[in-house]
Image (tube, rainbow, N blue to C red):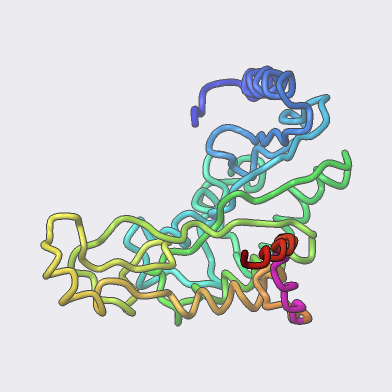
């Protein structure tokens, strides 16, 4: 998470950690990524380890001001949209722009090029597996301002580069008073509008229908764009065989004839 530690030191620490794990189980997959916070703009040769069974991972929350709506731009930021270079590339803006305030157009083509030129390029150059461990768009970015369009564009870029990913996040903490189905939520797909552990069992039962709701729109995008979430038809399994019964015991020996009466 630190921004001050040199990437080479982070890589050395991860190498030692992988060696410790593989000393116990060489089959284990070791997952490593760049500091700080797995930022994709630091995803380069400095993270590579001369080891097997290593997966290289990054996150993608770009532009931060758009996907998090943390700057209060949820009602103004849009996708596609134009952003200051510093909002897009953060502290790495000098590698891409002449000034921090230079305008950068972020659209589906920009996302596709970013994925292809950073994680996909590293994977191709060194024949190593790469994986996006986190990406997401907060519900506070309104759908008509591009929330779902952004998700579709990023998933298309991942599929085109053969990169798997994980959406952040399935469920979060309860957020009292937020109405279900309204664009007032964070990254979570399951919205919880009230239960915080302090209510009685009777209260929970009475309000159960209004406590949780699913982000149907984003879930629909994920199901449509991620091949592994599609329902795959399969042949029905044959019925199980009847249980085997223990063999019947042998019949008792015949009783000897009764002696004749005297």
Quadrant in the picture for the C terminus: bottom right
Q: Residue at x 48, y 72 (%)?
A: 78
Label the magenta part by its dominant secondary structure. loop
Percent x, y of residue 177: 18, 69
* Furthest residue toward front: 262
Q: Residue at x 12, y 70 (%)?
A: 203
Quarter of the rendering containing residue 54:
top right
Percent x, y of residue 71: 35, 56
Quarter of the rendering containing residue 9:
top right
Whether residue 243 is in magenta: the answer is yes
Mark count: 0
Front in this rendered view, residue 163 or 204:
204
Percent x, y of residue 39: 59, 42
Quarter of the rendering containing residue 126:
top right
Q: Is residue 78 left or right of residue 115?
A: left
Residue 119 versus residue 35 in the image, above or below: below
Front in this rendered view, residue 228 or 130:
228
Residue 243 versus residue 71 in the image, above or below: below
Q: Residue at x 73, y 33 (%)?
A: 28
Q: Residue at x 65, y 37 (%)?
A: 42
Q: Which residues are magenta?
A: 236-245
Front in this rendered view, residue 2 or 164:
164
Percent x, y of residue 260: 67, 67
Whether residue 238 is in magenta: the answer is yes
Residue 19 versus residue 178 in the image, above or below: above
């Amino acid at each position: 998470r630190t921004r001050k530690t040199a990437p080479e030191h982070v890589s050395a620490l991860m190498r030692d950690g992988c060696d410790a794990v593989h000393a116990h189980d060489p089959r284990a997959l070791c997952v490593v990524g760049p500091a700080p916070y797995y930022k994709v703009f630091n995803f380069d040769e400095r993270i590579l380890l001369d080891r097997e069974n290593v997966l290289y991972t990054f996150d993608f929350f770009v532009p931060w001001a758009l996907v998090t709506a943390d700057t209060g731009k949820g009602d103004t930021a849009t996708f596609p949209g134009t952003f200051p270079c510093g909002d897009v590339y953060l502290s790495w803006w000098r590698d891409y722009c002449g000034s921090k305030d230079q305008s950068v157009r972020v659209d589906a083509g920009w996302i596709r090029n970013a994925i292809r030129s950073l994680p996909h390029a590293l994977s191709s150059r060194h024949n190593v597996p790469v994986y996006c461990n986190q990406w997401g768009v907060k519900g506070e970015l309104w759908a008509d301002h591009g929330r779902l369009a952004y998700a579709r564009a990023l998933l298309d870029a991942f599929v085109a580069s053969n990169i798997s990913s994980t959406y952040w996040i399935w469920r979060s903490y309860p957020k009292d008073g937020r109405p279900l189905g309204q664009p007032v939520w964070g990254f979570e797909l399951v919205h919880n509008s009230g239960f915080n552990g302090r209510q009685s069992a009777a209260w929970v039962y009475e309000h159960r229908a209004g406590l949780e709701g699913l982000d149907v729109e984003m879930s629909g995008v994920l199901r449509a764009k991620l091949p592994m979430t599609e329902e795959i038809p399969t042949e029905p399994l044959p019925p199980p065989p009847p249980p085997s019964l223990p063999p019947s015991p042998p019949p008792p020996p015949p009783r000897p004839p009764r002696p004749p009466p005297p």
